[in-house]
Amino acid sequence: MADLQLSGREAPAVAQDGVWLACIECGQAFAPFAEVIYRCADCGGLLEARYGEYPTWTDFSGRGVWRYAAALPFDSGVSLPEGDTPLYEVPGLREDLDLRALRVKHEGMNPTGSFKDRGMTVGVRVAEEVGVSRLACASTGNTSAALAAYGARAGLETLVLLPTGKVAAGKLAQAAIHGARVLEVEGNFDTCLDIVSDLANRGEAYLLNSLNPFRLEGQKTIAFEILEDFREEYGAVPDRICLPVGNAGNTAALYKAFRELVESDSLAADEMPKLTGVQTDGAAPLVEAIESGNEAIERWDAVETKATAIRIGNPVNAPKALPGIRETDGTAISVSDREVTAAQRALAEEGIGVEPASACSLAGLRKLRERGVVDGDERVVCLTTGHLLKDPDAAAAAGSDPEPVPGDTESVLDHLAE
Ligand code: F0G
């Protein structure tokens, strides 16, 4: 079982400026920037960034991701800038779902249109510190778009591996125009990640998938923003946060933010919002592990869903995310592609444009509410992770069809009267 306790940890000799990496399985500590490692050199476990001190609410100042520098390994980095995303009210949906409060945190409003930018600004800063020339990732699309843009801004070469034919048009276009070298790999995302991890281990590139613990440091700021906004508005943190799950990096990042606030006595352990992960029926290994009570996930070799961003059968961050869901008394649920499209439309009716994977959070919430797992007395946040324009084909298919008309006003009026 992963050891995710932060408390009582003394900075080891390898720490630099109060930061180090620790293996979540065996506890071994590693220098954070002196060498490039993505997994424990002793046991292969996932690594987590640790600090000598964890921040309190008053340590945060400024804007965007770097407002939370007190919880990050550096004070600033290549920025476009990212974070400060809206926490929309959705009165129609709140009433429909009969909840005490419902907010939508739209991460699609980040510079490249997804939450990945938060991780990338920190990850690229670390890459600069380590001193690498080429950045790389495997991606279902959004990570590659963010990597390409932040790499370009930093003047670094970028390489992305994508599953052939399974990446939405907007994301591919972003990677291409920002100058990434794009390799289309025969196989799914998990194959791409296996290969790019090998390349990184051979020193060919610096890996910026969420296996890189510093990416997740940046993504913690989603939780800090939500909690700060809620405390201001409601005087309390949300009861539950629903989010789509692919590699489970975001779930792990949110949980780490909660733990850090608990560590600094800024949040009570029993106040941590219930992390509620949502996958689609065609790619639900994490839901399977939660439902069966298994300690580890079993890799799904065949995965399929219209929510291509989370078409993932082997969530690498599961050892961090499963304890997060369990310790916060959360849950996980899978939804059908049809339910995803319905939720995408429901959000669009509130003026919020999201890509299919993002709509999972709402689709999952609706299902859990119908089943009585989510109580009407709860204040809930749905995280929408990517912008509608990321996947224009899915949006067009989910929306109404354009109507052809002749090119004169009378014909248009006739048509409208039909
Ligand atoms: N939502 C969107 C829009 C995503 O792009 C992803 C992941 C997720 C949710 C899942 O987040 O992996 O932290 O559980 N996309 C990755 C990519 C895999 O390559 O862009 P997670």
Image (cartoon, rainbow, N blue to C red):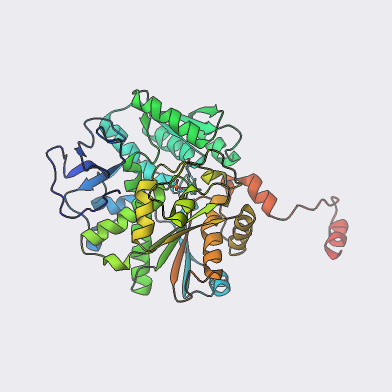
Q: Quadrant of residue 411?
A: bottom right
In the rendered view, does 32 fall on the left or right side of 249? left
> Where in the figure is residue 280, as x and y percent of width and height?
56, 51
Count of numbered circles in the view: 0
Q: Quadrant of the C terminus?
A: bottom right
Q: Is residue 401 left or right of residue 44?
A: right
Residue toward you, 20 or 177: 20
Instruction: Give the image location of residue 315, x and y in percent.
Output: 44, 43
Q: What x and y, as percent, mark residue 241?
A: 43, 62
Is residue 42 shown left or right of residue 176?
left
Q: Is residue 81 visible?
A: no
> Which residue is drawn at the image coordinates 37% and 50% (left, top)?
295
Q: Is residue 208 visible?
A: yes
User: Where in the figure is residue 287, as x and y percent of width and height?
Assistant: 48, 53
Quarter holding residue 345: bottom right
In the image, residue 34 sits, relative to residue 246, either above or below, namely above
Q: Nearest the camera: 174 or 14?
A: 14
* Residue at horizontal 13 percent and vertical 48 percent from the top: 10
Q: Residue placed at 49% from the left, 47% from the top?
A: 285
